[in-house]
Image: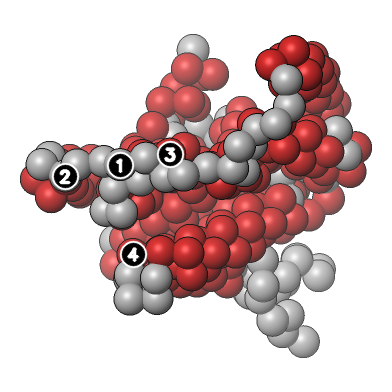
Amino acid sequence: MNLIYSFLSLVVPLFFGVVTSISLIWHYEIYQSTLIGVFLSIGFGIGITSILYFVWSLVFSPNAQAYFIVEFTLALSLLMSSYLILRHKPFKSLERAKDYQSLWITLFIGAFFIFNLIIVLRSFYQLTLNSPNGQYDAYAIWNLRARFIFRGGENWLETFPNTIGNQHYDYPLLLPGIVARSWSLVDQATKIIPAIIAGLFTFGTAGLLFSSIFTFRTLSQALLATLILICTPAYIFWGSSQEADIPLSFYILSTCILLFLHNLFGKDQKAFIFLAGMAAFIIGLVGLARRKK
């Protein structure tokens, strides 16, 4: 049951991201870019929810149950607004690069990709089992801060002075925020939630790379590029570590892709540059913090 509740606790953050990213991308009537929006929604949903939870915590208690009512209400309002804006919008096809590979070669690359993806998923699962608390930065900084927020109640800010060795109390709160928020929802500091978030960022980054290349190039090129990424041992290791390295790479890649889309569709278009600005802003909430002496 803990596994089910842990997944359900992240439904609304992902919903926030889906509605925000896909509705803005659909504004350009290019249905192929919807796949990019699906993977972008992982980072944007977690980022928006973490910011919302942080602002709520500053004003009220981090564990206040009323927060989740407000979060759910905002999600429904955002859904209705997007529906009213996009319900009559037509779609068109974007001209993509031709795939000169034979069907059999493409099928072989696809089968090889699926085979390796299964191995990578197994490796991620095994690494997570071996280190359920993540690597050093995870249990010494990110998950530690999440526990401070979750257990601190109204006094959560008093847990941040740097009195526990060299613990980087000034580091940003995107990862601790989303973990503490999900723990508050399930009312338990389960190890499953940080692992799920790590998995979302790890395979979400790979999916974002695949979708962006597939949108403008060929299926074979997208599969090969993604295969190179996920078969890099260090990538899966750091992805399962529950540290900030892979989330940071997700937002950097998102920013680059959105800036490319902005340049492709014309500089007078504002939605892509707005999303790129959001991704760049969230980068500051992930890991680019100045260490105080």
The tag on residue 89 is 2
**Callout 4 amino acid:** Ala
Q: Earlier in the sequence, mark 4 or mark 3?
A: 3
User: What's the CA distance linking mark 4 and mark 2?
Assistant: 16 Å
Q: Nearer the viewer, mark 4 or mark 2?
A: 2
Near-viewer residue (13 or 59) = 13
**Image quarter hosting the C terminus:** bottom right
User: What's the CA distance linking mark 1 and mark 4?
Assistant: 18 Å
Q: Secondary structure at mark 3?
A: helix
Residue 284 placed where, x, y %? 57, 71
Residue 264 placed where, x, y %? 47, 64
The tag on residue 32 is 3
Q: Earlier in the sequence, mark 3 or mark 2?
A: 3
Residue 151 visible in image: no
The tag on residue 92 is 1
Q: Nearer the viewer, mark 1 or mark 2?
A: 1
